[in-house]
């Protein structure tokens, strides 16, 4: 009787742990940037190279900051406890900054602010989701990429795509410039004469550089900036045109990582006159967000030091385009103000592996109990396999009737249950032989 009581108590404890783990996993905030402190994803260099603007998280609150190019004199310009500010962009005269403000649903609106943090103004409402923006050459208007907010919320089920818009910096004269529904439309840059807007677009195989002519009001999918042969041979991720229009910076998968499962992205520079491409970095991580300085022969960029984990941990870097000397910029930025170590440990402990281990332990002990006291050792295995079959069948129903991604999630859950069931079955089979 004592062994039976111990077995029942142990199963009870494991059941409570499993139920608590599942409940916490369902109810917890899955945002990977919860409690995060560190750099955001986009940067911008002031027209006179005197400042760098960037987004920065402090205990998951993302705001726009500026600093000297060496990382000193960090100043916070924006900030809200309920929303996130990202993707800063300087006006050509340096008198304004555009940035994106994201709400709790991830819908981003376009904002402008002075570099001293004054005269903050919202230019678009939440009917549009803004991807990124860039000022016109005269600084009087802003070009931006957007999609209808309701379509953005649909995710992969949406039949709409991104298009290019313009709006005056006072919020007037919103105009849709294209009607192409691009799958992706990003990394805007302006030609040196201000007449063309270059952007990156995924064509189904690789990232290409397209342009929109402000004079002709039309998209050119074979812009002269990148000849067709060169465009077909390379993937131009995150293309950025230099201020003088003579060079194109972009990131691309390094040759040595093309045969492995995790691609590594390095920084490349293309001379648009000679069409020669030069590799600038050999960091073996992931380079992102290249931005030219205007007077110095330098590019600022971010290195994702923990690629491809989340939250992404970025390091601000600069590189001399002539000597290839790389410098890490140590930002004198705020540090975390809260001690969240305990809750972070709990978040890390509650994962699919923990649930699987607790499930296997519970069902295995139940098999032992039923073997000794009911003679039905394989009943838990049968129940587990049946649960896996029902979940697998439900995945097809959900995928067809509701959401394909939810159906795929249920399919993965079914595969996990089948795997656990096999382990439970093997355990009781070996245990019975050992007991005998």
Image: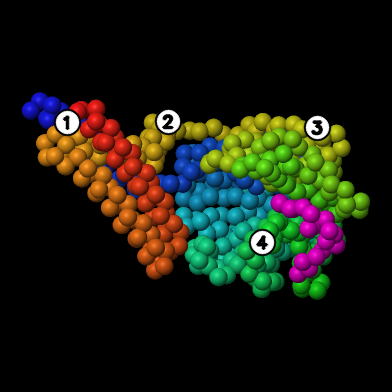
Q: Quadrant of residue 14?
A: top left
**Left or right: 429, with 53 as reference point:** left
Q: Which residue is mark 1?
A: 7
Magenta residues (range): 219-239
Q: Which residue is mark 4?
A: 204
Residue positioned most to the top: 2
Q: Earlier in the sequence, mark 2 or mark 4?
A: 4
Q: Which residue is mark 2?
A: 341
* C-beta proximity under 8 Å, tags 1 and 3: no
Q: Quadrant of residue 110?
A: bottom right
Indicate whether residue 236 is drawn in magenta.
yes
- Between marks 4 and 3, how big is the CA–CA gap? 35 Å
Per the image, label 1 sits on a secondary structure element best described as: helix
Q: Quadrant of the N terminus?
A: top left
Per the image, label 4 sits on a secondary structure element best described as: loop
**Left or right: 211, with 103 as reference point:** right
Identify the mark at residue 325; answer none if there is no mark. Answer: 3
């Amino acid at each position: 009787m004592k062994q039976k009581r111990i077995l029942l108590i142990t199963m009870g404890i494991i059941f409570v742990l499993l139920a608590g783990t599942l409940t916490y996993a369902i109810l917890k905030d899955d945002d990977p940037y919860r409690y995060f402190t560190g750099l955001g994803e986009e940067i911008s260099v002031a027209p006179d190279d005197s400042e760098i603007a960037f987004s920065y998280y402090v205990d998951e609150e993302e705001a726009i900051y500026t600093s000297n190019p060496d990382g000193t004199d960090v100043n916070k310009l924006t900030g809200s406890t309920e929303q996130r500010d990202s993707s800063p962009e300087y006006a050509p005269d340096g008198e304004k900054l555009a940035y994106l403000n994201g709400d709790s649903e991830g819908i981003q609106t376009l904002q402008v602010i002075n570099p001293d943090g004054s005269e903050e103004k919202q230019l678009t409402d939440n009917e549009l989701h803004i991807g990124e923006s860039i000022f016109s050459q005269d600084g009087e208007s802003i070009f931006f990429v957007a999609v209808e907010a309701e379509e953005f919320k649909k995710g992969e089920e949406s039949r709409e795509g991104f298009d290019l818009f313009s709006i005056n910096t006072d919020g007037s004269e919103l105009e849709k410039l294209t009607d192409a529904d691009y799958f992706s439309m990003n990394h805007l840059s302006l030609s040196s004469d201000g007449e063309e807007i270059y952007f990156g677009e995924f064509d189904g195989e690789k990232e290409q550089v397209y342009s929109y002519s402000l004079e002709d009001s039309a998209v050119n999918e074979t812009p002269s900036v990148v000849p067709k042969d060169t465009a077909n041979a390379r993937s131009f991720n995150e293309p950025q045109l230099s201020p003088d229009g003579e060079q194109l910076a972009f990131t691309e998968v390094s040759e040595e990582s093309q045969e492995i499962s995790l691609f590594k992205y390095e920084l490349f520079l293309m001379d648009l006159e000679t069409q020669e491409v030069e590799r600038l970095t050999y960091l073996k991580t992931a380079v992102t967000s290249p931005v030219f300085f205007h007077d110095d022969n330098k590019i600022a960029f971010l290195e994702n030091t923990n690629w491809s984990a989340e939250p992404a941990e970025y390091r601000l870097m600069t590189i001399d385009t002539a000597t290839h000397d790389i410098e890490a910029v140590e930002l004198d930025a705020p540090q975390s103000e809260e001690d969240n170590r305990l809750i972070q440990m709990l978040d890390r402990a509650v994962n699919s592996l923990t649930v699987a281990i607790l499930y296997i332990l519970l069902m295995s002990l139940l098999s032992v109990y039923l073997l000794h006291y009911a003679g039905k050792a394989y009943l838990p295995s049968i129940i587990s396999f049946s649960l896996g079959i029902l979940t697998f069948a439900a995945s097809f129903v959900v995928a067809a009737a509701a959401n394909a991604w939810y159906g795929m999630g249920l399919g993965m859950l079914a595969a996990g249950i089948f795997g656990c069931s096999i382990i439970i079955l093997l355990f009781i089979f070996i245990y019975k032989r050992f007991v005998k």
